[in-house]
Image: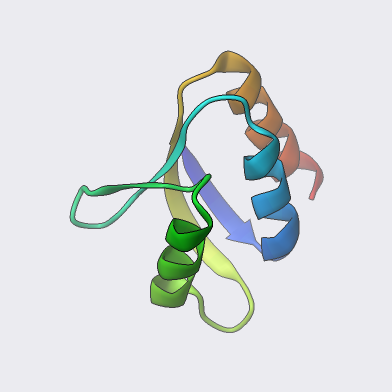
Amino acid sequence: MKVQNIKNIDKFFKVVDQCKGRVELVTGEGDRLNLKSKLSQYVSMANIFSNGEIPELEIVAYEREDIDRLINFMMND
């Protein structure tokens, strides 16, 4: 799924941390980084973070509950 205009990075990662299953960031090269790993969070954000907001990410969540949680974050944040 595409996630756009994340302005509250801390809240986004809190939502990711609450997910039960694996949540991955798909890079432009097609690599998948485990967003539940703090190291991956720091590395991925260092590479795409600019001006305090993330314009667009492609993420993959495998559990329906996690997908719903992420969609809820996008709609209500």
Residue most extreme to the left: 29
Q: Where residue 74 sits: x, y (%)? A: 69, 43
Residue most extreme to the bottom: 51
Q: Residue at x 53, y 57 (%)?
A: 38
Q: Where residue 76 sits: x, y (%)? A: 81, 43
Q: Where residue 50 sits: x, y (%)? A: 52, 81
Q: Colour scheme used in the picture?
A: rainbow
Is 55 located above or below residue 69 in the figure?
A: below
Is 10 located above or below residue 19 in the figure?
A: below
Q: Where residue 70 sits: x, y (%)? A: 64, 35
Q: Residue at x 66, y 24 (%)?
A: 68
Residue 26 located left or right of residue 54: left
Q: Residue at x 74, y 33 (%)?
A: 72
Residue 69 located left or right of residue 35: right
Q: Picture quarter containing residue 53?
A: bottom right
Residue most extreme to the top: 64
Q: Depth check: 63 or 74 in front? A: 63
Q: Residue at x 72, y 49 (%)?
A: 14
Is 39 located above or below residue 26 in the figure?
A: below
Q: How many marks?
A: 0
Q: Picture quarter containing residue 51?
A: bottom right
